[in-house]
Image (cartoon, rainbow, N blue to C red):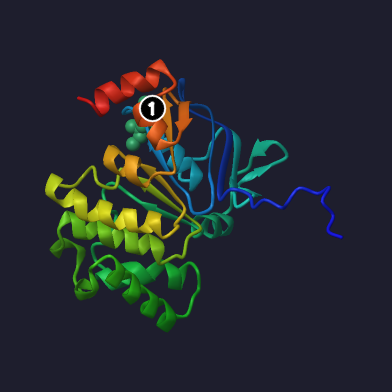
Amino acid sequence: MPDTSMPPAVAPPVLEIRGLTKSFGTNIVLDGVSMQVGKGQTVCLLGPSGSGKSTLLRCVNWLEPPDQGRILLSGKLMGFRDGGVVPMNGMELARARSRIGMVFQHFNLWPHLTVLQNLIEAPIHVQGRQRDEVIGEAEVLLDRVGLADKKNAFPAHLSGGQKQRVGIARALAMRPELLLFDEPTSALDPELVGEVVAVMKILAEEGSTMLVVTHEMGFAREAADEVVLLDLGRVVEIARPTEFFTKPKTERARQFLQRYVHA
Ligand SMILES: Nc1ncnc2c1ncn2[C@@H]1O[C@H](COP(=O)(O)OP(=O)(O)O)[C@@H](O)[C@H]1O
Ligand SMILES: [Mg+2]
């Protein structure tokens, strides 16, 4: 007889943030943020400029050490011990970061490396993986983002949309558990936004685990499992996109939608 008194084991979320605070001097930028991203979920982080979205992502991959709170990656606490924040050493940091892929607004590609070299650098040198295997996987990834023919090009010879698709492929080359996007289309000319959003939609549909800061409300509506609205460093609302965009629960969310979506 199976033991029915025990609840079924539930996998922890890939990312769990609990009560995260971060200040710069007297400026409280994150004020007790709690949220999570489940496996295979796409969560869009929305909010006005200066609300703390980038700082939140930067805390998650430890580009900024948080002041207080907890960050758990697949159930495992990152960088905290005995109730306090303990700076990770170089090795711990590299190991933790290599589980998280980050896509930046300004691409941050290495200009002196070809597209293929940009993809294989970290998997070989940070993760210590086999060069041939990494190259094979990188070629498949470039094909997936529609850039197989650009593998030997240098970033300077690519359009913004192509650079960002390389940025996405580079993040994927680390086989990350979690992908973070910080306004990946904000630096692009409007006609190039679509090709990047299309790649992100495919990733979301294929079950990548993604936390996406974006002003592309179309993406949030269509691809997000959940949206989180941040304002003044606090989570104002967490909702499914259908509810968030049609019947927001808070006045603050209504104002945000009025200003950023209906304008
Ligand atoms: N490294 C830093 N030093 C000092 N202040 C910062 C730093 N990074 C961000 N801030 C401040 O934190 C606040 C939130 O910034 P940010 O997280 O970039 O917001 P968002 O991405 O939502 O626009 C802003 O007031 C910004 O000036
Ligand atoms: Mg930002």
Quadrant in which residue 229 is drawn:
top left
Q: Nearer the viewer, residue 141 or 227?
A: 227
Residue 16 visible in rendering: yes
Q: The disc labelled 1 sits on which kind of residue?
A: Ser
Q: Is mark 1 within 8 Å of ligand 1?
A: yes
Q: Quadrant of residue 149?
A: bottom left
Mark 1 neighbour density, 10 Å: few (under 14) some (14–19) many (20 or more): some
The residue most toward the bottom is 132
Image quarter (top left, top right, bottom left or bottom right) of the C terminus: top left
Pinpoint residue 68: horizontal percent, then vertical percent.
59, 32
In the rendered image, residue 144, in percent from the top left (x then y), is placed at: 30, 68
User: Relative to 120, is 128 on the left or the right?
Assistant: right
| Residue at image coords 19%, 55% | 161
Residue at 23% x, 67% y is 146
> Considering the numbered disc 1 on the image, is that residue within a helix, a strand or a loop?
loop
Quadrant containing ligand 2 reads: top left
Please state, as top left, top right, bottom left or bottom right, where the N terminus lies in the image. bottom right
Numbered circles on residues, count: 1
- The residue carrying mark 1 is 51
Q: Is residue 146 above or below residue 101?
A: below
